[in-house]
Image (cartoon, rainbow, N blue to C red):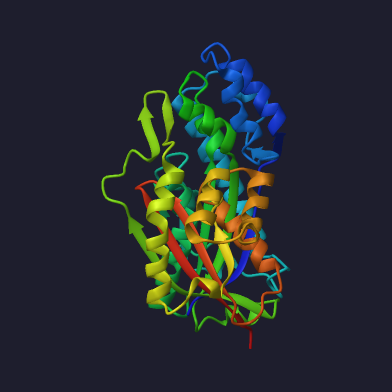
Amino acid sequence: MPSIISISTNAPPNTLNQDTTTEFARELFGESFQDIERLLTVFANGQIDERQFAVQMDWFKEDHSLKEKNDLYIELATKYGAEGIKKCLSNRLFLKEDVDVGDIEAIILVSSSGMATPSIDARIMNVLPFSAHTKRIPIWGLGCAGGAAGISRAYEYCRAYPESNVLVVCIELCSLTFQRNDRSKSNLVGTSLFADGIACALVSGDHSPMINKCAKSVRPVIRETMSTLMPDSEEVMGWDVRDTGLHVIFSRDIPSIIKKWLKPNVDQFLSQNKIESGQVDAFVAHPGGKKVLEAYEETLSISESMTAVSREVLKKHGNMSSPTVLYVLEEFMKKEMAPGSYGLMAALGPGFCSELVLLQWEGVH
């Protein structure tokens, strides 16, 4: 089974606390909502202390065309993506020695917060000395489910080519999609929740010599994955593409949908793998928001301790869309997990869809 050998996260440089963003939202949206103070409680109650952004606060105070936003997305996504890859391939927490980018067979580039053709992976290959024959697998449109889906696709690639090494690179610059003239409640909620982040994971097949470079005594092995689409649910989450750019679609029904739909999905996945929920030691959950985590706890009958790592990532970084679940995975990979421990990675995104990944920590021989 393919293994996750190394991982890195790369937060953009501009950190804003939630009090600052709340005051900004009060100034911007105050005239549009008579009940603005009640609505602003979404900032205070979201269990987010601070978030990181690719641009400074002043950028949000002016109008920007779609071209302006997207040009900046391409520039910064390429820069931060290359930095994240270098960090992952030289991370001494997980690797005894650096990995050469020339040893990477494929890049799975996950991003939904900007548009680029050629895609960002091609631009990164012009910055770092990858082989010209590296396979490029860009994935767009999976939003918050993208990080887990990227791991799933890397698993399948390495099952097919067990000597391979694949990079999963998640880059989301959600701040650059900000719509200052959109006075919808969805935009207000999005303003309270979303942030920017970059994460990179190195996945290697069974026959890759990369496993010998593991610095820790155990590493997570990917046992199985499952993708599920809810029919006719396009309006639950996603982008509304307009002349002014990408406008967030964020249904208030998401927590209730999770409660009704996720448990049968998870139960089926665990049953197929002959695992009971009580055997899961690490719940690697994408923290879509406070209510999403509460919905996980209620529908899966798990304690808050099982979502503690996800809550801490949400508190320090907000919802960064696709990279967020890899931020959570990194924290679990830093721990000394017992050999044989099971992990369940779960993320939900536009479609409406879920991506589940079964992990098991194994000793490095």
Q: Position of residue 122 (x, y in %)?
A: 46, 52
In this view, the residue in front, 311 or 153, is 311
- Residue 237 sits in quarter: top left
- From the viewer's perspective, is residue 88 above or below residue 17? below
Residue farthest toward the bottom in the current orientation of the protein? 365
* Res. 64 visible in picture: yes
Which part of the image, by quadrant, shows the C terminus? bottom right
Q: Position of residue 301 (x, y in %)?
A: 52, 61
In this view, the residue in front, 290 or 189, is 290
In this view, the residue in front, 14 or 316, is 316
Residue farthest toward the top in the current orientation of the protein? 31
Residue farthest toward the left in the current orientation of the protein? 232
* Res. 127 visible in picture: no
- Compared across the picture, whether 309 is left or right of 247 comes to right
Q: What residue is rendered at 49% in x and 60% in y?
A: 300
Q: What residue is rendered at 50% in x and 49% in y?
A: 123
- Compared across the picture, whether 35 is left or right of 92 comes to left
Give the number of callouts.
0
Q: What residue is rendered at 47% in x and 56% in y?
A: 299
- Residue 297 sits in quarter: bottom right
Q: What residue is rendered at 56% in x and 67% in y?
A: 202
Q: Position of residue 197 (x, y in %)?
A: 60, 46
Q: Position of residue 293 (x, y in %)?
A: 55, 50
- Compared across the picture, whether 88 is left or right of 70 comes to right
In this view, the residue in front, 162 or 38, is 38
